[in-house]
Image: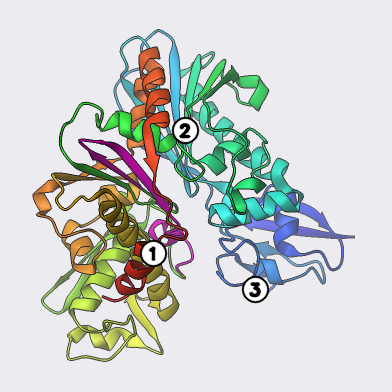
């Protein structure tokens, strides 16, 4: 038996280990959550730690003596918005349970005002960055672990709110997420969603006491999902964008790990989900990160040089989806990435930053050839899903496009159009609407009628399956190119 000192910034902790213990599993067991977007397969290289004097991949390394382990855990809560002085009354929390990010808002139920918002990376990513990885891990006996770590993180957010504003209790929580995430938090086996015909155990909304889920709130409302891969976050997004009230032809695109697309036409709602993968949320990108403080969210090319802007104006720690889109758009325009997605030297001044199949956009941060391929897959999946939905419904013109999600909020419209992510449309008709799931959840907290509206919406969307769709396959191959 070894005693190992684990250090993370100023914090230190001593843990016990046996010879041959896997370091990543050991850290997880002791509540130290290191990123492992590939689920511990050794491919994403996000679980790097210092073991003794050597930098190693935690998932591929084993205890062989009493050495210090230095980690850089990232699962911390980040305040996003704070408004004014706390008022007397009952409070609720709107919580968007995303595959990559959890977003929560503390709401005064008397008037619907938002007191503060918090975002945090979903700690379940230690079991893999996408829902397929989570389904696989649940099937391997980790369902309870997946549920417990996200419930613990949500309770941590609740405690932050209660302590900061001296609240005795939280009266209500409205909760939405994709269908897989809702299965996991309720400890419901999601394995049916991982294999054909992709059957969920439940889609309907649920209400229960918070303690039944292990959450420190009095009541929880789980919103209804639309289908296996169109979750409750899309139901609440439709509510937030007032799509029920418009007579325009509108496209709503939620640009996340699961690319969800809703098309509203005069004949009704149509929806599709496409496996974009987590590239737009910074996962599986070698120097990628979520949209957290220090993430490069914008890149600008001017007079031969690159500049950037980070979330919260901190020093760069990585690049998130919107920054990745900007960077690739620039490199395509400068012919450093060719139409097939391969790196090449060009006459651009930026060519000096291309070395050994890596483009360095910051001294120790780079874009790899594999990163470009991940982006191409994600871009093609979204673009092809949109085009297939329009083809199947006979839609030729769009009045508006709503871009939902954190990536959509920061997204540069010209970069998206230049890369072929979105259909050709004037930029003024593309509207970034932010986290529509969270916005809809706030309405549900305030109005019982909004919950019923989401139930009706979930029943009214006609789902276009893309798996064996001939249009989708043709579009996907074409959209891989720039």
Left or right, 24 with respect to 170, comes to: right
Residue, x 25% and y 65% (percent of image)? 326
Residue, x 59% and y 40% (percent of image)? 200
Nearer-the-camera pick, 140 or 291: 140
Nearer-the-camera pick, 191 or 54: 191
Residue 423 in the image, given as x and y percentages of width and height: 20, 59
Task: Check disc 3 and report its element: helix, strand or loop.
Answer: strand
Left or right, 109 with respect to 149, comes to: left
Q: Which of marks 3 and 1 is nearer the N terminus?
A: 3
Q: Mark 1 points at which residue?
A: 470
What's the CA distance linking mark 2 and mark 1?
32 Å
Q: Name the residue under label 3.
A: 56
Residue 398 in the image, given as x and y percentages of width and height: 16, 48
Left or right, 215 with respect to 346, comes to: right
Q: Are marks 3 and 1 in contact (CB under 8 Å)?
A: no
Please say whether residue 28 is one of the residues in the magenta stretch: no
The image quadrant where one finds the N terminus is bottom right
Q: Which mark is residue 111?
A: none
Residue 280 to residue 152: above or below: below
């Amino acid at each position: 038996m070894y005693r190992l000192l684990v250090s993370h910034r100023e914090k230190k902790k001593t843990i016990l280990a046996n010879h041959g213990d896997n370091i990543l599993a050991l850290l997880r067991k002791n509540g130290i959550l290191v990123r492992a977007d590939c689920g511990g397969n050794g491919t994403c290289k996000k679980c790097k730690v210092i073991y003794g004097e050597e930098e190693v991949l935690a998932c591929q390394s084993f205890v062989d003596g009493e050495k210090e382990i230095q980690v850089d855990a990232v699962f911390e809560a980040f305040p996003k918005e704070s408004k004014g002085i706390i008022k007397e009354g009952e409070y609720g929390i709107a919580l968007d349970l995303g595959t990559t990010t959890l977003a929560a808002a503390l709401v005064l139920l008397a008037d619907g005002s938002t007191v503060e918002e918090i975002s945090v990376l979903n700690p379940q990513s230690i079991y893999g960055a996408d829902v397929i990885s989570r389904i696989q891990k649940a099937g391997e006996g980790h369902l309870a672990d997946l549920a417990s770590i996200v419930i613990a993180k949500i309770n941590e957010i609740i405690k932050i709110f209660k302590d900061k504003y001296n609240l005795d209790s939280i009266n209500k929580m409205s909760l939405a997420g994709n269908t897989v995430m809702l299965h996991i938090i309720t400890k419901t086996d999601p394995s049916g969603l991982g294999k054909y015909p992709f059957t969920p155990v439940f889609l309907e909304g649920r209400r229960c006491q918070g303690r039944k889920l292990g959450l420190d709130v009095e009541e929880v409302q789980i919103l209804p999902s639309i289908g296996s891969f169109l979750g409750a976050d899309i139901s609440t997004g439709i509510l937030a964008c007032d799509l029920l009230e418009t007579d325009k032809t509108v496209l709503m695109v939620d640009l996340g790990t699961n690319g969800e697309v809703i098309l509203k036409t005069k004949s009704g709602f149509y929806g599709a989900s496409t496996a974009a993968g987590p590239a737009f949320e910074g996962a599986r990108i070698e120097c990628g990160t979520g949209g957290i403080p220090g993430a490069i969210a914008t890149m600008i090319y001017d007079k031969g040089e690159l500049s950037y802007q980070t979330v919260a104006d901190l020093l760069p720690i990585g690049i998130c989806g919107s920054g990745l889109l900007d960077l690739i758009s620039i490199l395509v325009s400068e012919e450093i990435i060719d139409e097939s997605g391969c790196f090449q030297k060009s006459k651009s001044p930026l060519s000096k930053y291309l070395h050994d199949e890596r483009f360095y956009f910051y001294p120790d941060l780079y874009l790899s050839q594999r990163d470009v391929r991940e982006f191409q897959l994600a871009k093609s999946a979204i673009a092809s899903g949109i085009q297939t939905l329009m083809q199947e419904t006979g839609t030729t013109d769009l009045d508006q496009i709503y871009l939902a999600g954190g990536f959509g909020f920061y997204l540069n419209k010209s970069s998206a159009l230049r890369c072929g992510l979105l259909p050709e449309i004037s930029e003024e008709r593309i509207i970034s609407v932010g986290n529509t799931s969270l916005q809809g959840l706030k309405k549900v907290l305030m109005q019982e009628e909004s919950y019923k509206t989401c139930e009706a919406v979930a029943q009214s969307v006609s789902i276009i399956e893309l798996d064996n769709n001939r249009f989708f396959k043709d579009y996907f191959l074409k959209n891989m190119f720039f």
